[in-house]
Image: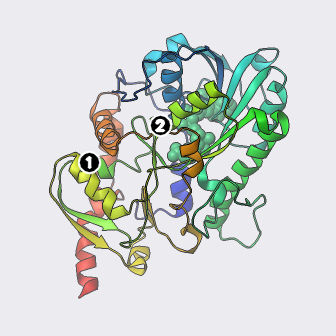
Amino acid sequence: MSKQQTRRQFLKKGVLAATALPLVGSGLMSMNSPLLSTKAVKPLKILILGGTSYLGPHQIAYALKRGHSVSTFTRGKTIPKIHPEVFKNVEQLIGDREYNLTVLENRQWDVVIDNSGRRVQWTKDTAQLLKDNVSMYMYTSSTGVYYPYLKGDLTEDTPLVLETPDHLSEDEKYEQDYGVMKANSELEAIRAFGKDRTIVIRPTYMLGPGDRTNRFLHWPLKLSQGGTTLVPGKKEDLVQYIDVRDVAEWFIRLAENKTSGIFNGVGPKSEQTILEFVKAGAKVFNKEINPILVDDYDFLKKQQVLYAIPWVMADKTHYGSARTSTKNALAGGIQYRSLEATFKDTLNWWQSDAVDPKRKAAYESNSNEFHNREQALLDLWKAYKK
Ligand SMILES: NC(=O)c1ccc[n+]([C@@H]2O[C@H](COP(=O)([O-])OP(=O)(O)OC[C@H]3O[C@@H](n4cnc5c(N)ncnc54)[C@H](OP(=O)(O)O)[C@@H]3O)[C@@H](O)[C@H]2O)c1
């Protein structure tokens, strides 16, 4: 929730960007999955297009524990920062989705997981190349395919926008382009592998250890301290989010079960407002808070507070962004960690030596970050209400 950030800058930095960061510390995390120690019935050969940034390392850690073997395909630029210890047991293939897929030729895998799809052509090329040598294609999409989020109860069969209209503002265009890219990439995967051999997962904001963005940090840091807490949004504003490990582990279980289809990767299980989320977070840390609901969208817009992930201002084009259906995900076997695990593990990770001290210092001193704006915003709000 930065002062000078437009939605486009936010998306560039957060949802879309994977940055290369140096490897520091052990990155050891507590993993609370009940299935973690269970081996799969049949070991799979899994290829991950990507695999070294955020979602990928969690998928690999779980897949290896389940007895599968994993190959990754990257440019070799992004250094794994979370679970770095697992990569010694991974075949690391080097190429570039833009122009060099040579190492993928004439190889066989049971499943390919396409995490790094950033262009439709990339997915088209890998899906076409691998369709005769791999049984299943799993495409990591996004709930961004539903943009503009004009209605609630967004189910997987909602018609998607496949072309960016001309009349949009720069910010709208940026957000729409991402959704259009993901929607068309899904279609390319299905075109090559067929519906019965394709699994598409559309995650919402993924929270948890290893996040390369700072967008969720405010909440565990603030709520572990307690005290007066600014809560942006209206009383009825909903939030949706998912622990990155819940998505990662679900991918592997869907691959094991060969459960084809399209699934929103969203939580929590039941509807939750931003106020309920904040109160639940404070409870995790056993802290007293005095929540101040700042519920005037005009005020928030004027102060450029458009989001505080998982809260996103539910204006016209974002009305449904936290109203995505969980029905299919639940039928498809998604399992949710407790909010306690997400908050505590994220905080422990942030405070561990897995996070570069320079990154921590930059976050703490950044005057645009919410924790450095909270008091001024509360003062302005008090004056505005008079
Ligand atoms: N974060 C969220 O909240 C969120 C929400 C919804 C959907 N998603 C989607 O989730 C997916 C997972 O993202 P992630 O970054 O966590 O995945 P990841 O699999 O952990 O890492 C992304 C990988 O892409 C590789 N890569 C980038 N450019 C490449 C190229 N030209 N050729 C080959 N490899 C390339 C990077 O390695 P090199 O740099 O070494 O090449 C890196 O390994 C993305 O598709 C994203 O859109 C994320």
Ligand 1 within 8 Å of disc 1? The answer is: no
Relative image position of residue 205 (x, y in whole percent): 49, 49
According to the image, label 2 marks what residue?
246
Which of the two discs, 2 and 1, labels the residue nearer the N terminus? 1
Relative image position of residue 287 (x, y in whole percent): 16, 52
Relative image position of residue 165 (x, y in whole percent): 76, 67
* Three-letter code, disc 1: Leu
The image quadrant where one finds the N terminus is bottom left
Identified at 35% across, 27% down, the residue is: 29
> Which residue ends up furthest to the front in the rendered image?
331
Mark 2 vs mark 1: in front: 2
Identified at 56% across, 51% down, the residue is: 327
According to the image, label 1 marks what residue?
221
- Under circle 2, the secondary element is helix
Ligand 1 within 8 Å of disc 2? The answer is: no
Identified at 53% across, 45% down, the residue is: 330
Measure how far apart labels 2 and 1 are at the Cα level.
Answer: 22 Å
Q: Is residue 83 left or right of residue 286?
A: right
Residue 164 in view here: yes
Ligand 1 image-quadrant field: top right
- Relative depth, front residue between 119 and 228: 228
The image quadrant where one finds the C terminus is bottom left
- Relative depth, front residue between 266 and 112: 266
Toward which corner of the image does residue 231 lie, by quadrant?
bottom left
